[in-house]
Amino acid sequence: MTDIEIAKNVKLEKIEDIAKKLNIDEDDIECYGKYKAKISNEVYKKLENKKDGKLILVTAITPTPLGEGKTTISIGIADGLAKIGKKSILALREPSLGPVFGIKGGATGGGYSQVAPMEDINLHFTGDIHAITSANNLLSAMIDNHIYYGNKLDIQKVTWKRCVDLNDRQLRKIETGLSGEKKIVPREDSFDITVASEIMAILCLSENIEELKQKLGNIIIGYNSKEEPIYTRDIKADGAMAVLLKDAIKPNLVQTLEHTPAIIHGGPFANIAHGCNSIIATKLAMKLADYTVTEAGFGADLGAEKFLDIKCRKAQIKPDVVVIVATIKALKYHGGVNNLLKHIENIKEKFGLNVIVAINKFNTDTEEEISSIKEKLSEKNVELSLVETFAKGGEGAIDIAEKIVTLSEKENQFRYIYDLNDDIKTKISKIATKIYGASRVEFTDIALQNIEQIEKLGYKELPVCIAKTQYSFSDDSKNLECKEPFTITIRDVELKAGAGFVVALAGKIMTMPGLPEVPAAENIDIDNNGNISGIF
């Protein structure tokens, strides 16, 4: 059976009953149909003094184009923990329509390890990403409207971009204002995919509506003729944007196919954004359960690094265990076990965290291949677990669940890769050399100019979010093995003052992806009875 067929054959529990498992009152949820709900902001306030549960971060080795089953494993681990009698919960990221209709066809796990209702989650869900898109584009409209009516703020350079939650490379660079109307000034513009919008990061890094509104006001939308920054608050857009996001900031409650509670809220795309779910979701989950399973996007060099250096620093949390997901296929794709060993070294030695490796097992994997990996890991004093959650659900994750419980009791020596008082070039260089393994970092002239300007404006102490290809430790998507010394090229640096970090663009990475030659959308359909097919 396909993923969607498996999901449809499961009788879901009403969302009110899932909430009861977490001791959430019916008055503290807002239902979106039978199986989805928003959780009230009041729930965390009630639990604020409760001790946090254990935090399990699931990341991965450098992936193949179709990924390594990180979400599937995350879901399976939460179900596996429940099967051994532990109170567990998921804190996952929301899927973007871009990948759903683009390359992957969905991001809700697979096989018997899924979150549900999978069609709803993969499509419009509760409207969070649409709200972010609207808030983003409202700001764009108000900027251009301000210029139309006299430009009292003397906006000479607009840096704010529009966005849409679809992969559309045609929108990477556009011309706007070509109507010919006398007062409309044509200018060059561009679109990001919504999940790369600064507003997505703001939503995920804010802990309440007050902080959200403040961060929205801190967005730099452009510069005047004196090269002074102009903020969202200057054009009085922050209040209206916050109104559009008033429901989006509330985390979403759903369930796995085995009825384990799951909070899904914000944050995909760790290759071009910070790629973490919301602080609100993670911190709430840690109050609601004894074990919270969360994930970070793509390989550990991207998702886990940003989770640890940006999110954990902001939220003042740390994982008790890090699970690195690998497949035999991906190890072959990247030239063998060295890719896995580098990710282990990063998490265990550089960040000082407890690590376990989850092999997402396929029928084609041989005993010889698995034994070889186990031997290499034994030399590093790292445990391995064969995980079969795709075929068996939580039952296929009992071994790793038991190992996680044991490992989570061990102390770790968590530390960040850089200090906030390092200058921006140093922060970027530390990530590139320590985590990616680059021999050196080159900065283009425009990158250096922008760094100089950012530091002059007083934003030197912000953390750094590097946008880089997910297919390699290097910035070259075709350099799969990274055997030779390589250089990371930073072509541009952008200030995200609202989100509270600096984005460094490495190599040829784009913040608006394109569709593949054969998009997943070609195989997605609906029949006369409303049955959806093709989302897998």
Image (tube, grey):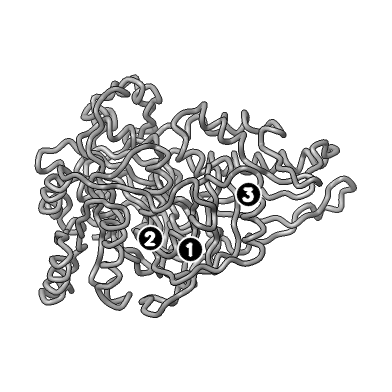
Estimate the spatial distance between the alpha carbons at disc 1 and disc 2, rounded to whole Å: 10 Å
Estimate the spatial distance between the alpha carbons at disc 2 and disc 3, rounded to whole Å: 25 Å
Q: Could you say which is closer to the camera, residue 337 or residue 525?
A: 337
Task: Say which element carries label 1.
Answer: loop
Q: Quadrant of the C terminus?
A: bottom left
Label 2: which residue? Answer: 301
Task: Give yes or no for contact between labels 1 and 3 (Cβ–Cβ under 8 Å).
Answer: no
Q: Position of residue 343 (x, y in %)?
A: 30, 63
Q: Could you say which is closer to the camera, residue 292 or residue 485?
A: 485
Q: Residue at x 63, y 60 (%)?
A: 448
Residue 211 showing in the rendered view? yes
Q: Nearer the viewer, mark 1 or mark 3?
A: 3
Which three-letter amino acid code belongs to the residue tagged 1?
A: Lys
Q: For residue 259, which quarter of the picture?
A: top left
Q: Residue at x 45, y 44 (%)?
A: 124
State which tag comes first along the sequence, 1 or 3: 3
Is 241 rendered above or below residue 73? above
Residue 122 showing in the rendered view? no
Task: Say which element carries label 3.
Answer: helix
The tag on residue 468 is: 1
Q: Quadrant of the N terminus?
A: bottom left
Residue lying furthest right: 182
Is 18 rendered above or below residue 441? above
Q: Could you say which is closer to the camera, residue 49 or residue 524?
A: 49
The tag on residue 454 is: 3
Task: Say which element carries label 2.
Answer: helix
Which three-letter amino acid code belongs to the residue tagged 2?
A: Asp
Q: Position of residue 447 (x, y in %)?
A: 62, 61
Which three-letter amino acid code belongs to the residue tagged 3?
A: Ile
Left or right? Give the position of 52 relative to 282: left
The crowd level at tag 3 (other Cα within 10 Å; few <14, some 14-19, many 20+) is many
